[in-house]
């Protein structure tokens, strides 16, 4: 989506844009290889007018079917095994397929494209000892980074799948209770709490009286099932004061679940303050932009540690496929070195944008005392930043069209990415996002491994074009 017009066309489902779209982020756009396998299963199992969506375990397909029925009580759903090991089909009528795909998008319980490819090529999907060893290496690598035993690390098919697993755990721990979310989050983290729990109370700016109100609930006789937060938050890069929060809820019954995806464990030490830490390994840990994976890390000191470990070990979460584990293990070998370079470039770009006359506001955690209190000894401020231009309604589309960067969703890739974040994540609720403090014109930059001087040059060129445009 190289132009602002193509972004709007994508959101408006303009055929001129969609006909050129070959693929996209795998939770948002059905991967062509997965789509091919879905079509094959439809031909093998389906009736006229039915669509198939595939899942890597029967339980995930069943959960998706229940979600479809919740959206349309008159829907007809069919859960079926397929001829492909560890692959189950949800078959629904054409008109109910969007509901099924919403489950796929929000929860991240999706079929790996590598898994689908192995089926299409007729390869035996048996898990070899070598493939299992790759997952073990990843767990050990994460265990060393987080300072916990490897059996406190749980891998899933993606970052959202990890968060959805955590949500299922806390709703089992405290059935019937709402969750609490602090600070403005990534869109699907809020969506799963809204749609797959008894409800969520959301505080988009968790400071002052709003935070006090949330704390009163946490300390009440009927506290939330859990407290969710991203640290820092997406896309405003705000950092909760976890030291103060933890002191207020030291004897809490509500587990605190933190997501460290935006700057990663290389920079922040969140686990001592949380019961669980979730991260999307798709992002900085991988860097390659070619594999989906997620993890949940259980704090051994949590009063809920035994419950979580037993739940995660026995739950039917969508697993990290061995073929994906093989790629992730290779990609993550130089994680710390890549993160160090991203930190340096991120800070340089944030300084450049803050001092540029065309820029109205920059969001980056280097000026946050709360962030600095949580930093690892050799940590930095990350490679992600957001900003808003002056006169944004006029200048933002021009800047987006001009800048010579890769453009699209995701972050943490080895190549730099520019995303018109609010347009992509909240196009149907732009006024609501702005009410929560997130400008509809906000741009989010994920810094890659390119030379810092080149990144600064391309930013300067795009910003300079605003002065010469008619």
Image: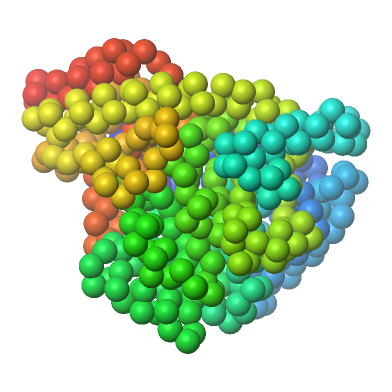
Say which quadrant the N terminus sits in.
top left
Q: Does the image show residue 176? A: yes
As displayed, is residue 379 above or below residue 432? Answer: above
At horizontal 43% and vertical 70% (from top left) the residue drawn is 249
As displayed, is residue 78 above or below residue 346? Answer: below
Furthest residue in direction bottom, as rendered = 221
Say which quadrant the C terminus sits in.
top left
Return the x and y of residue 289 as percentages of the image width and height: 55, 29
* Colour scheme employed for the rendering of this structure: rainbow
Name the residue nearer the viewer: 135 or 187. Answer: 135
Q: Does 94 sit left or right of 9 as displayed? A: right
Return the x and y of residue 351 as percentages of the image width and height: 20, 28
| Picture quadrant of residue 169 | bottom right
Return the x and y of residue 78 as percentages of the image width and height: 79, 64
At horizontal 34% and vertical 56% (from top left) the residue drawn is 240
Name the residue nearer the viewer: 119 or 6. Answer: 119
At horizontal 62% and vertical 79% (from top left) the residue drawn is 175
At horizontal 62% and vertical 50% (from top left) the residue drawn is 296
**Circle count:** 0
As displayed, is residue 20 above or below residue 300? Answer: above
Q: Does the image show residue 42? A: no
Q: Does 355 sit left or right of 334 as displayed? A: left
Return the x and y of residue 38 as percentages of the image width and height: 74, 45
Name the residue nearer the viewer: 214 or 303. Answer: 303
Name the residue nearer the viewer: 231 or 55. Answer: 231
| Picture quadrant of residue 275 | bottom right
């Amino acid at each position: 989506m190289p132009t602002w017009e193509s972004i709007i066309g994508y959101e408006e489902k303009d055929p001129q844009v969609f006909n050129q779209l070959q693929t996209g982020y795998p939770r948002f756009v059905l991967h062509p290889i997965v789509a091919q396998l879905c079509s094959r299963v439809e031909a093998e199992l389906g009736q006229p007018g039915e669509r198939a969506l595939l899942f890597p375990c029967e339980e995930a397909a069943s959960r998706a079917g229940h979600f479809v029925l919740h959206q349309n009580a008159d829907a007809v759903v069919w859960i079926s095994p397929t001829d492909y090991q560890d692959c189950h089909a949800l078959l629904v009528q054409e008109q109910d397929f969007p509901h099924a795909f919403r489950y796929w998008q929000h929860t991240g319980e999706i079929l790996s494209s590598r898994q689908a490819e192995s089926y299409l090529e007729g390869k035996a999907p048996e898990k070899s000892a070598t493939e299992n060893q790759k997952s073990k290496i990843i767990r050990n690598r994460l265990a060393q980074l987080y300072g916990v035993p490897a059996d406190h690390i749980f891998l899933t098919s993606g970052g959202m799948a990890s968060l959805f697993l955590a949500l299922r755990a806390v709703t089992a721990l405290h059935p019937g209770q709402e969750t609490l979310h602090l600070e403005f989050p990534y869109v699907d983290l809020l969506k799963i709490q809204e749609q797959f729990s008894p409800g969520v109370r959301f505080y988009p700016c968790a400071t002052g009286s709003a935070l006090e109100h949330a704390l009163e609930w946490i300390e009440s006789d009927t506290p939330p099932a859990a407290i969710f937060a991203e640290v820092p938050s997406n896309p405003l890069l705000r950092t909760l004061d976890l030291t103060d929060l933890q002191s207020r809820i030291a004897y809490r019954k509500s587990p605190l679940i933190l997501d460290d995806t935006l700057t990663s464990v290389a920079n922040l030490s969140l686990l001592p303050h949380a019961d669980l830490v979730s991260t999307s390994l798709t992002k900085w840990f991988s860097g390659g932009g070619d594999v989906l994976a997620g993890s949940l890390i259980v704090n051994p000191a949590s009063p809920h540690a035994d419950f979580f470990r037993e739940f995660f070990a026995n739950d039917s979460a969508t697993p990290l496929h061995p073929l994906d584990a093989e790629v992730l293990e290779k990609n993550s070998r130089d994680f710390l070195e890549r993160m160090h370079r991203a930190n340096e470039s991120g800070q340089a770009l944030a300084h450049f944008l803050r001092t540029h006359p065309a820029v109205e506001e920059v969001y980056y955690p280097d000026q946050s005392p709360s962030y600095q209190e949580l930093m690892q000894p050799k940590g930095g401020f990350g490679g992600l930043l957001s900003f808003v231009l002056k006169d944004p309604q006029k200048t933002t589309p021009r800047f987006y069209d001009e800048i010579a960067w890769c453009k699209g969703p995701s972050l943490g890739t080895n190549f730099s990415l520019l995303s018109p974040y609010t347009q992509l994540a909240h196009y149907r609720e732009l006024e609501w996002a702005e009410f929560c403090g997130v400008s509809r014109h906000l741009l989010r930059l994920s810094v890659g491994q390119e030379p810092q001087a080149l990144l600064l040059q391309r930013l300067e060129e795009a910003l300079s074009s605003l002065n010469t445009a008619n």
